[in-house]
Image: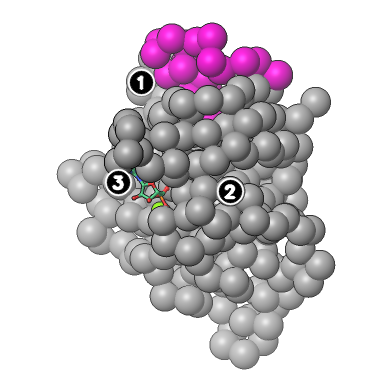
Amino acid sequence: MALIELKGITKRYGTGRTAVLAVRDVDLEVEPGEFVSVMGPSGSGKSTLMNLLGLLDRPSEGTYRLAGRPMERLGGRGLARERNGRIGFVFQSFFLLPRLTLAANVAMPLVYRGIGAMARRRRVLDVLAAVGIEQLGDRRPTEVSGGQQQRAAIARALIAEPALILADEPTGALDSRTGEGIMALFQQLNAAGQTIIQVTHEPDIARHGSRLIRLRDGRIASQEAVADRLSAEQLLASWAETEGVDGSAG
Ligand code: ADP
Ligand code: MG
């Protein structure tokens, strides 16, 4: 069963002559375990599509099945439950709470779910380790690098074990090398079975995915399997060779 099934999805903003069709008649299926990159010029509907996939917005037309369940039948509460239970979000600008430690930021989704402090602490340590910043849990966002902040944001997205990670320009605020480190992490997560959909306008970032979708004027203009997929392992090995680093820094 597909994890995501969109049929005839259209999103219209405004009415009448000033209406904008941000997404037009999109059909899309994503299987569990895929790593999809979405590219397209500014204004082509990438963020709108991500908001629809993330249940942050409702389509004007069309149907969305997430893990087989039709989303259009759900009310606001039901959508929130699906979103919190199945989807982890990663944004360009991290959105970490500045007064909280990284560990407290990462724990936040579990706090909302009413999970006890002991279980939270254990799970936080696990996901901080999974993203390579287990030693930074006590720091605040301003006390670590941009790449480390994004790792914390990814840990926060992972903590509730979402079926799907949605990342809108996850490397957009990072230098290219740090961005590659984030892609190496996404590839590791994806190799372990995590489904990921990311928006990027950088071709080299897109090539870490297994499938590339190009949007234009709200439509899917093309779709292809990524033939020359970049290998995170090779990348990390080549860095280690040239500079003697483990690739998890930054
Ligand atoms: P992208 O992320 O690819 O740059 P967006 O999804 O943000 O594109 O926007 C697609 C189109 O929809 C653009 O023409 C944009 O101006 C329009 N749009 C997006 N959000 C809104 C909104 N809330 N109200 C009106 N128009 C919007
Ligand atoms: Mg956008």
Name which residue lies at 52% across and 19% down: 82
Name which residue lies at 62% across and 39% down: 26
Identify residue type, mark 3: Leu
Query: Which residue is at the front of the view, 74 or 181?
Result: 74
Left or right relative to 166: residue 14: left
Disc 2 designates what residue? 219
Residue 168 against residue 231 in the figure, above or below: above
Q: Residue 96 bears which disc, if any?
A: 3
Tell me how far mark 1 sits from mark 3, CA to CA: 16 Å
Which mark is first along the chain, 3 or 1? 3
Disc 1 designates what residue? 112
Which quarter of the figure is the N terminus placed in?
top right
Tell me how far mark 2 sits from mark 1, CA to CA: 36 Å
Element type where label 2 sits in the image: strand
Where's residue 179, x and y in %?
A: 49, 68
- Residues in magenta? 68-87
Identify residue type, mark 1: Tyr
